[in-house]
Image (cartoon, coloured by chain):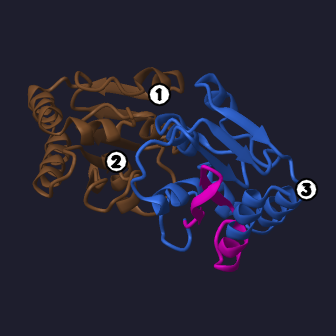
Chain colours: A brown, B blue
Amino acid sequence: MDEFMKIAIEEARIGLAEGGIPIGSVLVKDGRVVSRGHNKRVQEDNPILHGEMDCLNNAGRIGSYRDTVIYSTLMPCFMCAGTIVQFKIPKVIVGESKTFNGAREFMESHGVEVIDLALPECIKMMEDFINEKPQLWNEDIMEL
Amino acid sequence: MDEFMKIAIEEARIGLAEGGIPIGSVLVKDGRVVSRGHNKRVQEDNPILHGEMDCLNNAGRIGSYRDTVIYSTLMPCFMCAGTIVQFKIPKVIVGESKTFNGAREFMESHGVEVIDLALPECIKMMEDFINEKPQLWNEDIMEL
């Protein structure tokens, strides 16, 4: 498997072990990891720290994102997709979109390349989590 | 002037005094302030903490946003607009959109009501800032 997606999955599993929502993300520039992160809604009582946002938060101010790729174990929601569009990140590689459709079309309509690896490992991780904590999941995607 | 917009402007001025980008935001629920915040890119070396994001960050986990209104001294960018759409915040009141177009149409296409007060005070604050620190402003809106 893609080495960067492996790290994103590792981040998701760290989040799960912390009692959080298992979604991880990695920012890559010139073939190297700039930052990694995972959803911290539960851990930091913070609704904006989705995996992708935590990852971009951890990167700090890096200037242009035009030669970066962002990985996420799950298709980005509108918050994360809006951030990707605003930051002009040209490419997104996701683990899956079966458990959450996200905002793929919105990103593509703004010229972002979106690759969905449809990984069984990512799908199972989210399915198990959603089955176990449906209320927390609905809170995270604001289905309230 | 709207009392909540006054607080958003106060937040923007706090940010400016800290050496940051003068954009402030307030989240209101049932006619009361839930949280307030301002852009902290400079102060916290953090690219995701636009005024609206800092405000939502400061609110913590409040459950549904369906009966909230978010105020911002400036029209939200795609990151903040995507967050507003994802969080299902139904109404946005902004100080101005003259110095930055933002993502008004995107929000409206998702059913968000957007009111632009076009306040000279907000316009002048941003014009002065952009004239003084154009590079920092371009970094914040990712015109790099």
Inter-mark Cα distance, 3 to 1: 34 Å
* Circle 2 chain: A
The front one of B135 and A41 is A41
Let me know if residue B59 is in the magenta part. no
| Residue B13 numbered mark, or none | none
Residue at which label 3 appears: B120
* Circle 3 chain: B
Q: Residues within 10 Å of mark 1 (few under 14, many from 20)?
A: many
Q: Of the residues shown, which amino acid type is indicated by label 2?
A: His
Which residues lie in the magenta part? B12-40
Q: Is residue B11 above or below residue A57?
A: below
Whether labels 3 and 1 belong to a single chain: the reply is no
Q: Is residue B51 above or below residue A4?
A: below
Q: Of the residues shown, which amino acid type is indicated by label 1?
A: Met
- Furthest residue in direction right, as rendered: B120
- Furthest residue in direction front, as rendered: B30
* Circle 1 chain: A
**Residue B83 percent location from the top left of the image:** 50, 42
Nearer the viewer's eye, disc 2 or disc 1?
2
**Residue A94 percent location from the top left of the image:** 27, 32
| Residue A107 numbered mark, or none | 1
Residue at which label 2 appears: A50
The front one of A11 and A77 is A77
The image quarter containing residue B114 is top right
The image quarter containing residue A139 is top left
Label 2: which secondary element: loop
Q: Quadrant of the N terminus of chain A?
A: top left
- The reply to whether discs 2 and 3 touch (Cβ–Cβ < 8 Å) is no
